[in-house]
Image (cartoon, helix red, strand yellow):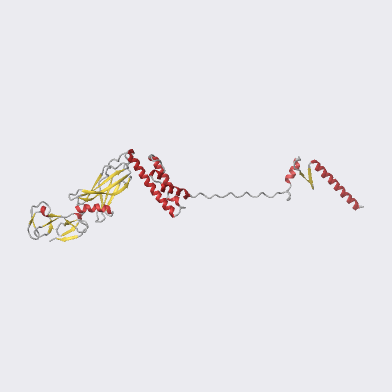
Amino acid sequence: DKPSESASSGFGTAASGGKAAAEVSAAGGERIGSREVKLAGNDASPAAESSHSAAPSSPASSLPPPPPPPPAPVRKPASKSGGVMTEVRRVAAAETPAEVLNVAEDADDAAMQKAWKRMIFILHPDKLMGCTEEERVAAAEALHAVHKAKEEFRESSQASGAVDVPEQLEAAGRPVCTRSTPGQRRYECRWLVPEITDKCRPVEKYEVYGPRIFSHTGEPMEWALLATLPRLEGSFIFVEESPTQQEVMWAGDRMRVPAVPLTVYGCNGRGRSEALYFHLPWQSKFPWLQGQQSMLCRQCCTMQLRPPGKADKVPCVACGTWLAPNAAAVMVNCSKCYGEALWDASASRLDCRLCGRHLAMGL
């Protein structure tokens, strides 16, 4: 009879459990084992909620995590050379200085300066690191065009009558010979640079001129441009190594002039100032230019030293004929450089004072 009792007790337990489950279901909840879970949409006691929050979730009831969002598209940074080359193409297609600087034709100097600085910043070599070699060459040409457009725009605005010509410059001392070696002669000329720019008479640049030819009386002729200097430069170095400046020096050597003149002008778009003259000591400064001229005897055609001073007549060193120094005076030129040949103090050598070539010996 014991098995029957256990079976009946088990059946009673199941029946009581079913009855309890029915009571829980009627109350709006569900009992799993000894734990109570709140059904959706029904109220439960705080103790049941705390018990539910503390219970671990069932693997069957847990949902898979949502898929991650797709990655955002990566945008490539804009090419730095794109804007630069756009400006390069625009400058290449421009026809006037105003179009190159991208300003109006009647823009003032401040607007022009602002546009010029903007273009210099855009076309700076540091902005061309990612460009090809052809693009760099094109950008360099555009930068040169921008500088040129700035000067032309300023000159055109000044030429229209907005400003007047600069005032005459003032010398800052006498010219100084810093080197007197033949073939390497050098003079330095200085002038005062205005500390405050006169907006009505501005100086944009300086021009230096020198004579290429001297007349037989020593007058300078055929003035040539020797150098163009920026407006903040206050000195000019006159050197023999420069071909154009050498031509001016040799012109003074041929005629043995006492001084070689140079002129300096302050210039802007309206014109240039009055000339500032520098007279460079010449014949007395270089020993090889010092000497005595020649005279020619008409009886025996002997070339000889012309005596200094105002002697009335002197005998010829070859035939003894009396010669008037002023009437028999001649100028002997070198066949190589056309410089004047002079006798030394002892009348023993006749040398060219320009190239140093030896031409004759004295009797």
- Horizontal side of residue 120 vs 205, given as left or right: right
Near-viewer residue (108 or 189): 108
Quadrant that contains the C terminus: bottom left
* Vertical arrangement, residue 155 with respect to residue 346, above or below: above
Which quarter of the picture shows residue 107? top left
- Horizontal side of residue 151 vs 363, given as left or right: right
Residue 184 % position (x, y): 26, 55
Residue 286 % position (x, y): 21, 53
* Vertical arrangement, residue 337 with respect to residue 123, above or below: below
Q: Is residue 327 visible?
A: yes
- Horizontal side of residue 114 vs 353, given as left or right: right
For this orientation, the residue located farthest to the right is 1
Near-viewer residue (361 or 273): 273
- Horizontal side of residue 235 vs 58, given as left or right: left
Residue 281 % position (x, y): 22, 49
Residue 179 % position (x, y): 26, 53
For this orientation, the residue located farthest to the left is 321
* Vertical arrangement, residue 351 with respect to residue 236, above or below: below
Q: Can residue 116 be seen in this view?
A: no
